[in-house]
């Protein structure tokens, strides 16, 4: 329970909060969640996260002071999630159908996955409780329990996850993947909207334009990162057509491989931890299921390790991370009585370097990582980052020339290049 007397902090004073988000809108949730309340004494919506933590939605924390039937007062908080304004990136996000996908994840699949574990005798929670969803003027909105009440918090995205946090996150990811694969095995394929993730055929123009806008900034900045043979990497940088061909390759799924419902956007801001008194992780939970896609677990593994492992362990523990995940995955598949052959560790390791998976390394490095490592900034949002203006170009150069980003890229870009993930000529038309 939050303390109604504590100061309410707004981590993003620049966020415009829709004026229709009022106490009246929350009546249904309060009637169900707090049936003994008499009236709302105070209603205060603020931003839930600082700029740079989420790029596809508006996240609010709603503070509500209630008067109860017994005369006492009670403070409640909820998390409210809604779509970006159409002129602030909402139109582009709408191309992907993210909110309808997330709605079915919370209403159908996530409860079903947790039920599989319960039937097997394990009490495993994958996601926060979704208390209410609604479609208003064509837009879907969510109201969630506030995990901060249970002392859950995000990991510092700039520092990344330490080894213990990585182990917990990889094990939780394995639990999600195992349940989704068993569910598919028992119930048949997921709907067609789960055939696409970050790459959608509807979004070719958006993806091409996004690449074109950033290409100049990257080539200019790569020479400043301190990479030996920087000119080699600049010369190898993909053309727009190679990039789009690489994007399209992600839609190919090998039915002979072990496949699963990937989270699709798995990085530090899409998980939350709470901690034991000694500082060790107690529980870890996943959030944000908008990009889920049927495909290889390598999608999430490559994306997550690239974006979220602390710099000092990212490459040192790279292969170990895959093993940690695989051990928990096979353990859960056995528990849930998966009927197909269990994935082999060697196959999982090699899947990271497949032609249709390597997009996720390049996309993570050039799309997410620059912003994740960039300190909180009021202009750090989708609209500003893709703006074809002088201000937009200056912001992109600031982000990509950030010394912290350069330090990571100096090691990580050659690491993937040397493993063939950046063989962009592979995507040339025959």
Image (cartoon, rainbow, N blue to C red):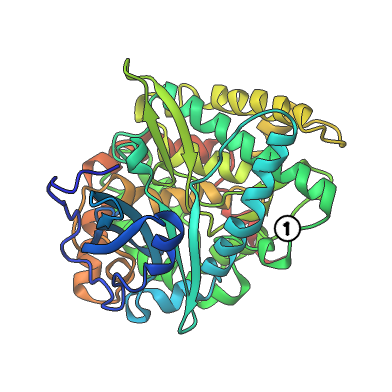
* Mark 1 nearby-residue class (10 Å; few <14, some 14–19, many ≥20): few
What is the quadrant of the N terminus in the image? top left
* Corner quadrant of residue 100: bottom right
Which residue has dot 1 on it? Answer: 252
The image quarter containing residue 216 is bottom left
Q: Judge whether 19 appears above or below 265 on screen.
A: below
Q: Residue at x 50, y 66 (%)?
A: 133
State the residue lying farthest toward the front: 70
The foreground one among 416 and 300 is 300
x 30%, y 78%: residue: 20
Residue 289: horizontal and vertical position, in percent?
53, 54
Quadrant containing the C terminus is bottom right
Q: Is mark 1 on a helix, strand or loop?
A: loop
Quadrant of the rendered image containing residue 414:
top left
Q: Residue 56: x, y in percent?
A: 41, 64
Q: Horizontal and vertical percent for residue 374?
A: 25, 48
Q: Residue at x 25, y 39 (%)?
A: 404
């Amino acid at each position: 329970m939050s303390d109604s007397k504590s100061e309410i902090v707004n981590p993003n004073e620049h966020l415009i909060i829709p004026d229709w988000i009022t106490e009246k809108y929350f009546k249904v949730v309060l009637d169900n969640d707090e049936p003994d309340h008499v009236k709302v004494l105070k209603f205060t919506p603020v931003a839930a996260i600082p700029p740079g933590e989420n790029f596809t939605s508006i996240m609010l924390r709603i503070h509500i002071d209630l008067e109860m039937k017994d005369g006492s007062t009670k403070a409640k908080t909820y998390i409210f999630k809604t779509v970006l304004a159409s002129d602030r990136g909402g139109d582009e996000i709408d191309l992907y159908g993210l909110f309808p996908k997330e709605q079915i994840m919370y209403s159908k699949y996530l409860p079903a996955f947790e039920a599989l574990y319960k039937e097997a005798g394990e009490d495993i929670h994958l996601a926060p409780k979704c208390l209410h969803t609604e479609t208003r003027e064509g837009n879907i909105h969510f109201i969630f329990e506030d995990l901060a009440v249970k002392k859950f918090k995000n990991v510092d995205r700039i520092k990344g996850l330490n080894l213990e946090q990585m182990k917990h996150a990889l094990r939780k990811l394995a639990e999600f993947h195992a349940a989704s694969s068993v569910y598919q095995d028992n119930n048949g394929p997921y709907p067609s909207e789960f055939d696409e993730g970050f790459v959608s055929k509807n979004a070719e123009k958006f993806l091409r334009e996004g690449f074109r806008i950033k290409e100049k900034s990257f080539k200019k900045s790569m020479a400043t990162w301190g990479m030996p043979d920087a000119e080699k990497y600049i010369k190898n940088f993909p053309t727009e057509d190679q990039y789009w061909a690489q994007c399209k390759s992600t839609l190919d799924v090998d039915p002979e491989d072990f496949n699963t419902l990937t989270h699709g956007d798995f990085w530090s801001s899409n998980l939350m931890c709470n901690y034991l008194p000694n500082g060790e992780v107690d529980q870890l939970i996943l959030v944000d299921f908008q990009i889920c896609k049927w495909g290889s677990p390598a999608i999430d593994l490559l994306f997550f390790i690239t974006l979220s492992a602390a710099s000092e362990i990212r490459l040192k523990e790279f292969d170990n991370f895959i093993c940690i995940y695989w051990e928990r995955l096979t353990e859960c598949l056995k528990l849930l009585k998966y009927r197909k052959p269990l994935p082999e560790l060697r196959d999982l390791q090699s899947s990271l370097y497949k032609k249709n998976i390597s997009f996720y390394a390049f996309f993570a490095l050039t799309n997410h990582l620059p912003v994740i490592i960039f300190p909180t900034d009021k202009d750090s949002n989708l609209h500003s980052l893709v703006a074809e203006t002088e201000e937009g170009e200056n912001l992109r150069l600031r982000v990509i020339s950030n010394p912290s980003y350069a330090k990571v890229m100096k090691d990580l870009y050659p690491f993937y290049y040397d493993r063939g993930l950046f063989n962009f000529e592979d995507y040339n038309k025959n």
